[in-house]
């Protein structure tokens, strides 16, 4: 199957693909613009949550799906971004918009730190264990740095505005989040379609062969993890604004599973998949939030089902509808 | 100040025994199938809850309940391997890690749905007394846990080193296809080893539940410590898992007392990160060759 499928996807990746299909990517966000008018407060909040999980999923997918590394440190980037934004707003009184970039940079720094073990040759299960420990260590740090983060009780994030545009209204947050989410998706798309993205594919498929071909693998590890950290850190700052409260419990293993569910159900290594996953997975727990434990059960079952039945996620179903959804950054197994 | 050291070492060994049995159960699965089970912590949790159900729920005495719990988890591990792990065994490591993590998540969700966040305790089947050995206080918990773990260790040693099964383990670990060629039923072997690993984990969970409260989240706590012990000792080494677990237990107690109480929580994380950065093969592991 692989030979034929691969040839087919190569052909679709070539320049002959009709450009008009890509219009949908520009029309979809535009179509969303009037959406808040039709929704109540709570539905708007869920919508914002979905938009927030777009960068988080996209960033995670770059490392796991495109670079092919078992790095479980995403929640650490997410939490660092969130706390950076929250602390800058609560302690220094900065407006929210001024914290987005610092949050992203903080995430990128953490991404560089997380690439150190990968550079030292730690791979596969060992890398997973190590990054898992890193994430838990970060959560412990939030709990212990009470003077800065409010400890296990958490900290409140003050309301903010964007040059007079009030950001305590869900509908206002929506437009800001939409811009950020679209920007992240476009930037990541460009990154993955460039020589960098092709280097990621080469590393994922066969690292030794990639190095032998002259791909500086180490540099791309750092780049991939730093970009992931940057994007997820921005997601963290969105989280701080959206929820208005940061607590260490928001960045635990359950959160990691949720983010994993986003990229697995959406489609590994697929940008469209990250977005679809964010929509599907974020909406699910809000439906079942009355039963503690139920969402864990559902996510677990969903991931099991997807791995067994639909290993390329919902994005592979979309690709059958229209070739424009076919992911071009994910060749081979 | 240093007067406390022997006492700390003794209670560290008692905690370390628990880590050792968890690390050992993960090593059994890893050695047999070269898969690291990221859902293992939740299997430990499930074992503890199973023991709770058989004692407090059904009302059996402790020992038969423990045996039933181990049996139940053995079957669960076997079923998990057959239905979920085997179909994707040749796939990327990511799918395997995710599958195990997802199964663990289902178990945790089920436990939370059924018992919520209520605090459950496993009733001790023995009086809670303590003995004074010179300056050292030895509790009955310490003695029972250590005795059970030592028995399990002895049984594993016999199986892996003195019985013919040990050779099978070695053969399958080295090359699965080669093992199949010389007539080893690799499939049955994998299933049995997953079952054994789950049952051993359940034993660890039941012992853990003797002096800590049962919560659905105890899996993550166990998983991190099991990983730390495995990493410290060296991946895939049975001795390594035991020595790593004991060392980890002792280090937690000593660092927690002499340096800062913070170390009780973070020793496991710090050990994992430092060992993988400085000496990835651990104390007893062999340097793995890289396959191209």
Image (cartoon, coloured by chain):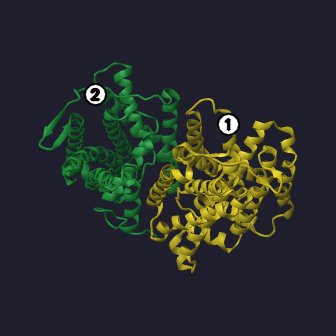
Chain colours: A yellow, B green
| Residue A109 located left or right of residue B217 | right
Which chain is home to disc 2? B
Taking the spot 87% from the left edge, 41% from the top edge, the residue there is A37
Q: In this view, does A30 lie to the left or right of A328?
A: right
Q: In the rendered image, is residue B163 in sight?
A: no
Query: Residue B124, which numbered label?
Result: 2
Q: Is mark 1 on a helix, strand or loop?
A: helix
Q: Name the residue under label 1.
A: A286
Q: Which mark is residue A228?
A: none
Residue drawn 82% across and 38% down? A39
Q: Which of B93 and A51 is in front in this view?
A: A51
Q: Nearer the viewer, residue B118 or B197?
A: B118
Could you tell me residue A31's position as x and y percent? 87, 49
Marks 2/1: CA distance? 40 Å
Residue B97 drawn above or below residue A193:
above
To which chain does the residue with label 1 belong? A
Q: Where does residue A120 sit, x and y in percent of width and height?
A: 45, 70
Total labels drawn: 2
Percent x, y for residue B278? 37, 68
Residue that sits furthest to the left in the current view: B134
Where residue A67 sits: x, y (%)? 59, 64
Q: A87 and A324: which one is in front?
A: A87
Crowdedness near tag 1: few (<14), some (14–19) or many (≥20) residues, C-alpha within 10 Å: few
Q: What residue is at 69 percent from the left and 63 percent from the top?
A: A101
Q: How crowded is mark 2: few (under 14 residues within 10 Å), some or many (20 or more)?
A: some
* Residue at 52 percent of width and 49 percent of height: B98
């Amino acid at each position: 199957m692989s030979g034929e499928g691969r040839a087919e996807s190569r052909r679709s990746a070539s320049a002959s693909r009709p450009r008009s299909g890509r219009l949908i990517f520009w029309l979809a966000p535009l179509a969303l613009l009037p959406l808040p008018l039709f929704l109540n407060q709570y539905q708007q909040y869920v919508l914002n949550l979905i938009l927030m999980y777009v960068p988080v999923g996209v960033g995670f997918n770059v490392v796991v799906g495109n670079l092919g590394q078992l790095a479980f440190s995403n929640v650490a980037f997410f939490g660092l971004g969130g706390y950076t934004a929250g602390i800058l707003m609560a302690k220094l009184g900065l407006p929210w918009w001024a914290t987005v970039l610092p949050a992203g940079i903080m995430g990128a720094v953490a991404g560089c730190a997380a690439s150190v073990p990968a550079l030292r040759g730690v791979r596969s299960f060992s890398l997973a264990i190590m990054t898992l420990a890193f994430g838990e260590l970060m959560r412990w740090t939030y709990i212990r740095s009470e003077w800065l983060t409010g400890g296990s009780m958490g900290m409140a994030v003050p309301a903010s505005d964007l040059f007079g545009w009030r950001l305590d209204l869900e509908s206002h947050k929506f437009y800001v989040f939409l811009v950020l989410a679209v920007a992240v998706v476009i930037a990541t798309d460009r990154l993955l379609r460039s020589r960098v993205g092709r280097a990621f594919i080469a590393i994922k498929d066969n690292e030794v062969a990639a190095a032998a071909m002259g791909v500086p693998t180490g540099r791309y590890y750092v780049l991939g993890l730093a970009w992931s950290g940057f994007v997820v850190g921005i997601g963290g700052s969105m989280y701080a604004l959206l929820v208005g409260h940061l607590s260490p419990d928001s960045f635990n293993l359950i959160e990691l599973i949720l983010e994993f569910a986003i990229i697995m159900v959406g489609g590994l290594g697929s940008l469209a998949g990250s977005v679809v996953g964010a929509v599907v997975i974020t909406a699910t727990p809000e439906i079942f939030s009355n039963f503690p434990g139920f969402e864990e059960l559902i996510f677990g079952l969903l991931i099991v089902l997807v791995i067994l039945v639909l290993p390329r996620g919902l994005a592979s179903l979309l690709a059958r509808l229209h070739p424009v959804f076919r992911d071009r950054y994910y060749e081979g197994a | 100040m240093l007067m406390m050291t022997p006492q700390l070492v003794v209670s560290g060994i008692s905690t370390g025994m628990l880590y050792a049995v968890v690390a050992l159960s993960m090593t059994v699965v890893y050695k047999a199938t070269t898969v690291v089970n990221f859902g293992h912590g939740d299997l430990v949790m499930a074992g503890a809850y199973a023991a709770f159900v058989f004692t407090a729920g059904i009302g059996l005495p402790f020992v038969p309940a423990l045996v039933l719990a181990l049996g139940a988890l053995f079957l669960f591990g076997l079923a998990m391997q057959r239905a979920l792990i085997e179909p994707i065994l040749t796939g990327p490591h990511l799918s395997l890690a995710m599958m195990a993590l997802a199964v663990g998540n289902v178990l945790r969700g089920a436990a939370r749905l059924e018992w919520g966040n209520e605090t459950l305790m496993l009733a001790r089947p023995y009086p809670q007394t303590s003995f004074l050995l010179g300056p050292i206080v030895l509790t009955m918990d310490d003695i029972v846990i250590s005795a059970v773990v030592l028995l399990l260790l002895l049984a594993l040693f016999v199986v892996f080193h003195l019985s013919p099964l040990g050779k099978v383990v070695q053969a399958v670990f080295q090359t699965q296809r080669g093992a199949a060629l010389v007539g080893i039923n690799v499939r049955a072997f994998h299933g049995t080893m997953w079952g054994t690993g789950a049952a051993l984990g359940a034993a660890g969970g039941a012992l853990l539940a003797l002096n800590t409260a049962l919560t659905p989240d105890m899996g993550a706590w166990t998983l991190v410590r099991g990983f730390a012990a495995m990493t410290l000792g060296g991946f895939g080494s049975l001795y390594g898992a035991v020595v790593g677990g004991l060392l980890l237990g002792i280090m937690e107690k000593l660092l927690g007392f002499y340096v800062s109480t913070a170390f009780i929580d973070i020793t496991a994380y710090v050990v994992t990160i430092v060992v993988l950065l400085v000496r990835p093969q651990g104390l007893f592991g062999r340097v793995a060759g890289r396959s191209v």
